[in-house]
Amino acid sequence: MANTYTLIASNTVGASSVASVTFSSIPSTYTDLLIKLSTRGDRSAANAEYFVKFNTSSANFTYKLLQGNGTTAAASSSGSQGLAGVSDAATNTASTFANSEMYIPNYAGSSNKSFSIDSVMENNTGGTTPPIYAYLIAGLWSNSAAISTIEFYPESSTNWVQYSSFYLYGIKKS
Amino acid sequence: MAAGSTYTPLATTTLSSDQSSVTFSSISGSYTDFVLVAVAGITTQAGEAYQLRINADSGSNYSQTEMWGNGSTASSNRRTSQTYLFVGGSRVGSQLTLEDQFTLQFQNYSNATTYKSILMRQGAAATGTLAAIGLWRSTSAITSIVITPTNYNLKSGSTFTLYGIVAA
């Protein structure tokens, strides 16, 4: 059978909110990983950034961020955080979830791990209230270990709410 | 019944030594779109870029609109009547550590009636992230692509994988 996107694992948040979602025991048999996220958090704001850990570590992450809010584009960076996207949160339009995609090529290789993220919110309102963002992220985990665990957690010790979903796919090059 | 193929790997190259370019030729016309995924580096860091040519076309038939963030400044740019597409732009760095990642999506590449659009995402955490749309002004089906640095060589260990995507 031809190689495709192979679903490795999925997680949809149930009635009880959760502080994080983790994929563990990720097999090293694929070439790249792709994670698709549909998220909403319970932070008492219109949006919540969220972060990633690889192999239970939040260390050795850097990123460059390009963002837009419908009127202004801005750029920023960090040398200490694994920023992984932006999500709708408690005060934003009800029943609205952000969509994100994280691509990690050569996740099981012996080099540092580059990854890219597209993360978008939308609620069909004009202007900048409530704040809605589109994020483009170039990330790096400066660690040569194969990635076997991935954890996503919202900022400020808040939670993912019901129906937030996370899908982990493996892609093989042969 | 087994599901149909989505991303089907067509070819992959991992450089065993520094080299001036990487080429994918004889690309099958059996797919709807194809995607190139790469993690790469260039042997010298100063002001380099990855350049893309299609079907060995060196004419001024390429244009693109791009958006770029370098960690402090967001910018947008247009390039017209180019002799290649700039994949990642000229401000990408960290090539020495194979941290440049790019994904190129060639939409509807095998038809012989329309110009060809390419969605480009590129980034390296040390320098920035880019999103761009490129256009090759040719109605020819795409059968080959070549990636070349502006001045220097692709670094040993760089990987390039081509996937085909079928619409149905």
Image (cartoon, rainbow, N blue to C red):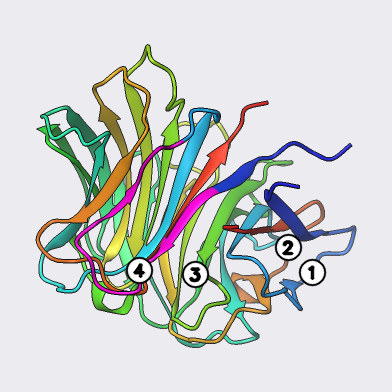
Q: CA distance from mark 3 to mark 1?
A: 19 Å
Name the residue tied to disc 1: A18
Q: Of discs 4 and 2, which sits in the foreground?
A: 4
Same chain for mark 1 and mark 2? The answer is yes
- Residue A109, given in percent of the width and then of the height, sits at 52, 78
- A61 or B42, which lies in front? B42
Going by the numbered disc 1, the residue's amino acid type is Val
Name the residue tied to disc 3: A83
Q: Of discs 3 and 1, which sits in the foreground?
A: 3
Residue at the image position 58 percent from the left and 76 percent from the top? A108
Element type at mark 4 = loop
Name the residue tied to disc 2: A160
Residue A122 seen in render = no
Chain on which label 3 sits: A
- Which contiguous range is marked in magenta? B10-27
Asked if residue A72 is positioned above or below residue B111 in the image, the reply reads: below
Q: CA distance from mark 1 to mark 2?
A: 5 Å
Element type at mark 2 = loop
Name the residue tied to disc 4: B15
Q: Of discs 2 and 3, which sits in the foreground?
A: 3
Horizontal arrangement in the rendering, residue B60 relative to residue B124 (left or right): left
Q: Quadrant of residue A172?
A: bottom right
- Residue A126, given in percent of the width and then of the height, sits at 46, 31
| Circles 1 and 2 in contact, beta carbons < 8 Å | yes
Q: Of discs 4 and 1, which sits in the foreground?
A: 4
Element type at mark 3 = strand
Q: Quadrant of residue B137?
A: top left
